[in-house]
Amino acid sequence: MGQIATRAWLRARLHALDAERHVRIHDLVKPGSQDLRMLFARHEGRDVVLANDTSVGVGHAPLSAADRLASIPGLVDAFVSGCIEPF
């Protein structure tokens, strides 16, 4: 599900990028904490909708040279909008 959403986001915003050929996505899903699992178990079968969006995180450290370059404000937006040419 995460890979499908990520590739859809990339296709919608980076038209020159082939999200299938040019991008490698590694996703990792692990069980939540014991407390969180107990909370969801207590509400199982009830008409209560629970969400835990704080357990989702994306990132990697330390930043690579490419990450540091991409973090320059406006660079990615300028590239995507066609204001600058690819490297």
Image: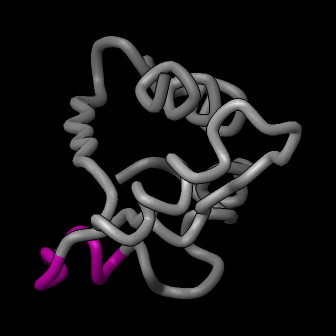
Q: Residue at x 33, y 78 (%)?
A: 69
Residue 63 lies left or right of residue 67; in this view the side is left
Q: Residue at x 26, y 39 (%)?
A: 27
What x and y, as percent, mark residue 30? 23, 47
78 or 84, which lies in front? 78
The span shown in magenta is 61-69
Locate residue 23: give its quadrant: top left
76 or 31, which lies in front? 31
What x and y, as percent, mark residue 73? 59, 86
55 or 37, which lies in front? 37
What x and y, as percent, mark residue 46? 79, 38
Based on the picture, tell me whether residue 71 belongs to the magenta stretch.
Answer: no
Q: Residue at x 22, y 43 (%)?
A: 28
Based on the picture, tell me whether residue 67 belongs to the magenta stretch.
Answer: yes
Is residue 69 placed above or below 56 in the rendered structure?
Answer: below
Residue with the most extreme right position = 47
Residue 55 lies left or right of residue 30; in this view the side is right
Is residue 81 placed above or below 20 in the rendered structure?
Answer: below
Look at the image and name its color scheme: one colour
